[in-house]
Amino acid sequence: MESSAAAPLVNVTGEMLAPVTNAITSNLGALLPVGITIMAIMIGVSLIPRIVYKFF
């Protein structure tokens, strides 16, 4: 059941990535605050228990 066929190589070009970069840069005003908020929540969830356990 072994196959000797190799997976075809895919060359990713700048033209293929252009829609992705355009979408990110055009929506950066909305993505940045959402990303910062999610990061702050993740940091807060990890730091708050450490601070509480330190004092109690």
Image (cartoon, helix red, strand yellow):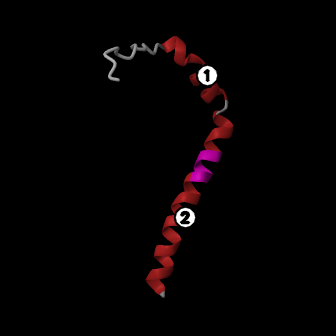
SS class of the residue under badge 2?
Answer: helix
Q: Is residue 30 left or right of residue 43?
A: right
Q: Earlier in the sequence, mark 1 or mark 2?
A: 1
Q: Quadrant of the N terminus?
A: top left
Task: Look at mark 1 in the image and give the residue it sits on.
Answer: 22
Q: What mark, if any, has residue 4 been given in the picture?
A: none
- 19 or 6, nearer to the observer: 6
Asked if residue 56 is positioned above or below residue 7 in the image, the reply reads below
At x 38%, y 17%, the residue is 7
Tell me if residue 54 comes above or below residue 24 in the rendering. below
Q: Which residues are magenta?
A: 34-38
Q: Which mark is residue 44?
A: 2
Residue 44, how many percent across, how many down?
55, 64
Q: Residue furthest front?
A: 1
- Residue neighbourhood size for the residue with mark 2, other residues' Cα within 10 Å, grouped as few (<14), some (14–19), many (≥20): few
- Using the image as rendered, state which of residue 1 and residue 31 is in the foreground: 1
Say which residue appears at 45% left-offset and 15% top-offset: 12
Q: In the rendered view, does 55 fall on the left or right side of 18?
A: left
Residue 20 percent location from the top left of the image: 58, 23
Task: Check the image and report above or below for 42 versus 53.
Answer: above
